[in-house]
Image (cartoon, grey):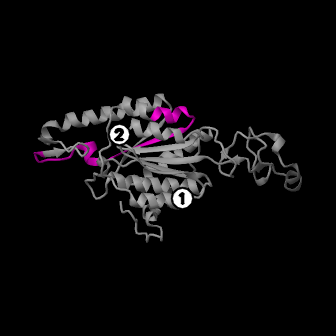
Amino acid sequence: MSLLGGHTPSAIPGARFMDPVVLARIGNLELVSRAVCDGFINGLHRAPYFGASVDFAEHRGYVPGDDIHRMDWKVWARTDRYYIKEYEAETNMNFSVLLDVSKSMDYGSRGITKLDYARILTACLTNLVHHQRDRVGFVAFDSEIVEHVPPSAKHMDTVLHVLDRLKAGRPGGRMRDPLHKVAEHFGRRGVLVVISDFYEDPEEIVDAITPLRFRGNDIVVFHVLDPAELEFGFSDAQAFEDLESGVQVPVVPDAMRKEYVSLVNAHVTALQQRFSEVRVDYTLLDTSKPLDHALYKYLASREKKVRR
């Protein structure tokens, strides 16, 4: 996948990560929160502050289950059709991406690193939410918090600037410390997207993310892996280096491929199970696969479930 997808970047450097193919695919979808969100801006999400704003926004067609007290009977008298009045108090959410920029994210066997794939994912999701008129923010972390952009309706360009200058370099260490620390900044409920290659024990990963969930946030995780990490399609005996620790281990790929793939599958299955238990959405992404298809599939499925 090309970073630009045949697209000429705008004056904002990070705009090169807004892949037009991905944007076109997901443009008619929404990222809807499963939780009630706080706020007053006219976004897509229901606010708990009924009556906080009574400014009329628009009409929409009546669907079974709508409150008939919000029916516009004057419009019905003119058109013989049922319409519901929408107000500004049906409002916005906070949205932030928490991106792992540890050294292992700099790996790529087929022309694109996990970090660049994750940056495209971040830019496209943030753009989608920004156009919903919701607040967008961003956190980059390795063993510490590297960058922090608080959620704001005005921070789209800031997120793109930060994405452009990010580099993966330092070892990641444990996710627990940076994520527990940043959880203090997300007291207001919203949607948090965590993107990482998740090279830790599943229990430790869930422990790192749990405080974000307990504060009422809706958590989505994207597990980004290179195809070489999933399939171990190497042939020559050679020394393999741990990108986090720098330790090199001599390996004969044919002798251990089956065991390696089995361990990776077990790790993915354990993550799926543990995240499901704590009501966190989990999606595995292969960097050799088109992002637009995977992201469309996830968003369409999520939107359907939330709306139901």
For disc 2, the marked residue is 198
Q: Residues within 10 Å of mark 2 (few under 14, many from 20)?
A: many
Point 82% across, 40% down: residue: 68
Q: Is residue 183 left or right of residue 90?
A: left
Q: Is residue 35 left or right of residue 253?
A: right
Q: Are discs 1 and 2 less than 8 Å apart at CB?
A: no
Q: Amino acid at mark 2?
A: Phe
Q: Which quadrant of the rendered structure holds the N terminus? A: bottom left
Q: Earlier in the sequence, mark 1 or mark 2?
A: 1
For disc 1, the marked residue is 156
Q: Is residue 28 visible?
A: no
Q: Position of residue 76 (x, y in %)?
A: 86, 51
Location of residue 110 (image quadrant): bottom left
Nearest to viewer (mark 1 / mark 2): 1
Point 51% across, 43% down: residue: 192
Give whichever of 235, 181 is nearer the camera: 181
Q: Amino acid at mark 1?
A: Met
Give whichever of 156, 142 is nearer the camera: 142
Give the distance between the C-alpha atoms of the residues marked 1 and 2, in whole angstroms. Answer: 26 Å
Total of numbered circles in the picture?
2
Q: Is residue 219 magenta?
A: yes
Q: Residues within 10 Å of mark 1 (few under 14, many from 20)?
A: many
Start and end of the magenta stretch?
209-238
Q: Position of residue 250 (x, y in %)?
A: 11, 41
Q: Which mark is residue 213?
A: none
Q: Is residue 257 left or right of residue 217?
A: left
Q: Is residue 245 visible?
A: yes
